[in-house]
Image: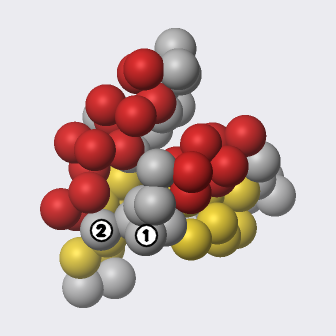
Amino acid sequence: MKVEKILLAEQMDILLIPVPRQLSADCGMAVKFSLESLSQVKDTLHKVNMEATEIWLMQSGQFQLLS
């Protein structure tokens, strides 16, 4: 996955995971990272003309759409 390569090249602590079923029934992939890394992830993707489709926060098993 291109996003994974880009973020790992920046030494970011990320994990490629299947999209949680609560968010999509499709068999897509997602990048998991800490909330503290959010601005760095956004900045890194912006530098290579990429944007996240959706960003979700998971707390206590509940999902909240951030963007």
Q: Mark yes or no: residue 33 visible.
A: yes
The residue positioned 36% from the left and 53% from the top of the image is: 56
Q: Which residue is mark 1?
A: 13
Left or right side of 33 for 17: right
Which one is in front, 9 or 49?
A: 9
Q: Amino acid at mark 1?
A: Asp
- The quarter holding residue 62 reads bottom left
Quarter of the image containing the C terminus?
A: top left
- The quarter holding residue 33 reads bottom left
Q: Mark yes or no: residue 32 visible.
A: no
Left or right side of 53 for 27: right
Q: Which residue is mark 2?
A: 34
The residue positioned 34% from the left and 35% from the top of the image is: 42
Q: Is residue 8 above or below residue 60?
A: above
Task: Kindly indicate whether the residue at mark 2 contacts the one at mark 1 (C-beta within 8 angstroms).
Answer: yes
Left or right side of 57 for 48: right
Which one is in front, 45 or 24?
A: 45
Q: Amino acid at mark 2?
A: Ser
Residue 9: x and y, percent? 57, 51
The Cα atoms of the two marked residues, 1 and 2, are separated by: 8 Å
Q: Secondary structure at mark 1?
A: loop
Extreme-left residue of the structure: 36
Residue 12: x and y, percent? 42, 61
Residue 2: x and y, percent? 73, 40
The 10 Å Cα crowd at callout 1, few under 14, some 14 to 19, many 20 or more, is: few
Q: Secondary structure at mark 2?
A: loop
The residue positioned 40% from the left and 21% from the top of the image is: 46
Mark drawn on residue 42 = none
Q: Is residue 19 above or below residue 45?
A: below
Q: Earlier in the sequence, mark 1 or mark 2?
A: 1
Residue 59: x and y, percent? 23, 76
The residue positioned 64% from the left and 52% from the top of the image is: 4
